Image (spheres, rainbow, N blue to C red):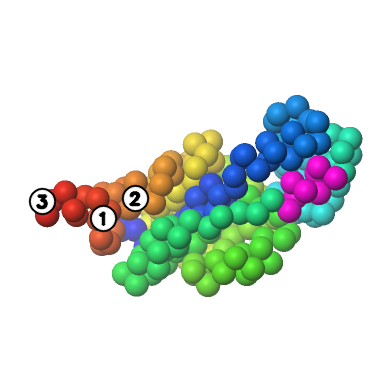
Amino acid sequence: MIRVVLFDLDGVIRHFDPAHVAEIERRHGLVSGTIAGTAFSAPLIDEVTTGRITRAEWVRRIGERICNDAAATEWGAHPAVVDGAVLELSDELRAAGLRTAVLTNGTDTIPTELAAQGISDRFDAVFNSAEIGFAKPDPRAFRHVLDALGVEATEVFFTDDSEGKLAGAESLSMRTHLFAGADDLRVQLIAAGVGIKRPAREALEEAK
């Protein structure tokens, strides 16, 4: 029986507009993909998501490597849009008696970011790799979540928008799902035996 639904953060609960990044690169005369290619390259991304450097230091190093501090700083302030449908799904799951949690490959500023976006209290727990010391897909990150919540892996349903991040959860026998939208996630949860409402479009089709 599923007792906990574990969500990834970026790409699932909140989203960043790639057009915004493209505009920053255009204005600063950078080749498309330069910032992301630098920011998410190893070992830099590993250092920030396991808490070995701060987010501020991460952005500083990005600017240094692309030889454009202003572009890096602007990218670092890139606003995210919260997915209201996912938040509503979390609320519904909690009302149905399940616990919901977040596991993110994040930085030291995640608590402040989530509080500012009003996300923190929409989940029972938030687990941040920068605090855990291990990042997805490392099974140790998922083991930390299981131990903290006091549940077995088979009682957890994990969704992430990156297929590669699912591997660590699968290695522990968690139920996993590649995120493709709130409605699709809802369908998969129902298939896993979770007692929530079907997507509105399915209910409407049945009523016809």
Read off the residue under disc 1.
200
- Residue furthest to the left: 208
Q: Residue at x 41, y 47 (%)?
A: 181
Q: Residue at x 85, y 45 (%)?
A: 70
**Residue 57 visible (yes or no):** yes
Read off the residue under disc 3.
208
Residue 180 pos. (x, y %): 41, 42
* Amino acid on which the number 1 mark rests in the picture: Ala
Residue 100 pos. (x, y %): 45, 64
SS state under label 1: helix
Magenta-colored span: 70-77
Read off the residue under disc 2.
183
Rendered image quadrant of residue 143: bottom right
**Residue 24 sits inside the magenta stretch:** no
Between 5 and 37, which is closer to the camera in this rendering? Answer: 37
* Amino acid on which the number 2 mark rests in the picture: Asp
Rendered image quadrant of residue 2: bottom left
Q: Residue at x 62, y 69 (%)?
A: 115
SS state under label 3: loop
- Between circles 3 and 1, the one closer to the viewer is 3
* Amino acid on which the number 3 mark rests in the picture: Lys
